[in-house]
Image (cartoon, rainbow, N blue to C red):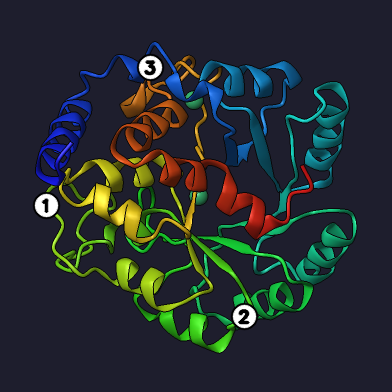
Amino acid sequence: MTALTRRQALLTASASLFAGSSAWAQGDTPWRQERIVDCHHHLRADMASNVAHLDGAGMSQAMPLIQDDKGRDLFLALQARYPGRFVGWKRGVNSMDPNGMETLTKAVRDGALGFGEIKSKVAADSAENQRMFALAGELNVPIMLHFEDTPITGTDGFNTGYKRFEAMLKRYPKTRFILHATSVWANIDAADTGATANPRGKVTPVGLTDRLLADYANAYIDLAAYSGFNGLSRDPEFTPPFLVRHQDKLIYGSDCTCADGHGGGVTGPGAGQCLARQTLALIYRVAPIAVFRKAAWENAARLHGFKA
Ligand SMILES: [Zn+2]
Ligand SMILES: [Zn+2]
């Protein structure tokens, strides 16, 4: 294909996906033969439904995010019952927890491959968070933060002040940061006003997030959640070159809450939709296969040091 026809094909493909006409959003999962790790898997209490979500959306593995000791026990039980499917875990704490540093240090000693997700009602560059950034650098594990300046519900955001976060990337160069959630994705757009959490429409270059990923070796981006899918699906011209440009920084994850990898059990605005499946369908379709493989497995394996 010539560059032009390939580009046209990509635009047409992502425009039709965008319009929701893709069979992949519900049916086939042609990416199923690839190795795919969901790095943003929140554990379901029922053991089988964790695997049902992976199988339903065509994913080989998951890396759960664990917030307490009960979660860790569930992870170990899953690893024993489904060998090879759960490749590692991250540990999250509330930044305000006075025992947080101890908990995180112990988690890494017990095998955690990172911190996260960190979703606290503090400023992103607060002293409480900075203790964690320093610790992640010392222990040589990545940290994933949920940035939400424009509250989706209620009146408070989480890890607020994304526009100031560049200073943290500079101050903690040994710490690898995985940037996640609405403020990260809203700021792919240089013209973003912060008026809505998940803005739609054309992206004006060059947004802060685009620049941070380009300029800082220690900045990675989580493709998970509705914010990730929205950011990648709002402007079909923006997305393919964005994925190529940052191909070594993309970390696939779902943050999906559905029961079965088909959107089951989801009520409200995303009813009947599986975010894992939607985002995989999008990147499988619009990115070169080598970029898909980096996002789905290779970058995460390198970043977290998977043994498998
Ligand atoms: Zn989050
Ligand atoms: Zn799902």
From the image, state whether disc 1 or disc 3 is nearer to you. 1
Q: Is mark 1 in CB contact (under 8 Å) with mark 2?
A: no
Q: In the rendered view of the protein, which quadrant contains the N terminus?
A: top left
At a point 67% along the width and 24% down the height, the residue shown is 50
Evaluate whether residue 58 shows in this view.
no
How far is the residue under mark 2 from the one under mark 3?
39 Å
Classify residue 37 by image quadrant: top right
At a point 76% along the width and 78% down the height, the residue shown is 138
As drawn, the residue found furthest toward the top would be: 27
Left or right: residue 306 compared with residue 103: left
How far is the residue under mark 1 from the one under mark 2?
34 Å
User: Up-down: is 261 above or below 34?
Assistant: above
Residue highlighted by disc 1: 202
As drawn, the residue found furthest toward the front would be: 2
Amino acid carrying mark 2 in the image: Gln
**Of 252 and 4, which appears nearest the observer?**
4
Residue highlighted by disc 2: 130
Tag on residue 187?
A: none
How far is the residue under mark 1 from the one under mark 3?
26 Å
From the top left corner, tell me how far across and down residue 174 is, in percent.
Answer: 64, 80
Residue highlighted by disc 3: 272
User: Mark 2 falls on what kind of element?
Assistant: helix
- Local crowd size for mark 1, using a 10 Å CA cut-off: few (<14), some (14–19), many (≥20): few
Sooner in the amino-acid sequence: mark 1 or mark 2: 2
Q: Is mark 2 in CB contact (under 8 Å) with mark 3?
A: no
